[in-house]
Image (tube, rainbow, N blue to C red):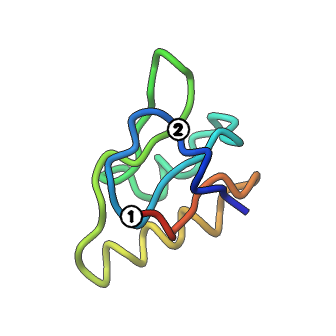
Amino acid sequence: MANPDDKNEGNVPGKFYVDSACIDCDVCRQAAPDFFGRNDDLGISIVIKQPTTDDEIALCDEAKSSCPVDAIGDDGE
């Protein structure tokens, strides 16, 4: 389970975030490329845009459920 106290540097503020458990597998960036990007300096994924519509939230939820290390959280602020 993702830890909101351990968010990766560069996540935009909001509900979704990626924490330091990220292994840079690219699953989230493929599932929801408009919302997840890569911090090239750190070699990790980050949330680059928060979803606003139900369809966008569904894409981010899909990315979250597909994360092999549970590094995506949806309880950020």
Q: Is residue 58 above or below residue 12?
A: below
How far across and down, in percent of the image, does residue 35 sit?
A: 34, 53
Which quadrant, please, contains the N terminus? bottom right
Q: Is 74 on the left or on the right of 49, as rendered?
A: right
Residue identified by numbered label 2: 8
Dot 2: element: loop
User: On the rendered structure, is 48 left or right of 63?
Assistant: left
- The amino acid at mark 2 is Asn
Residue at horizontal 65%, vertical 39%?
20
As drawn, the label of residue 77 is 1
Taking the image as shown, residue 1 lies to the left or right of residue 66, namely right
Image-quadrant location for residue 58: bottom left
Residue farthest toward the front in the current orientation of the protein: 5
Mark toward the start of the polypeptide (1 vs 2)? 2
**Residue 36 has which mark?**
none
Q: Is residue 3 left or right of residue 63?
A: right
From the top left corner, tell me how far across and down residue 17 is, in percent.
Answer: 48, 54
Q: Nearer the viewer, residue 26 or 15?
A: 15
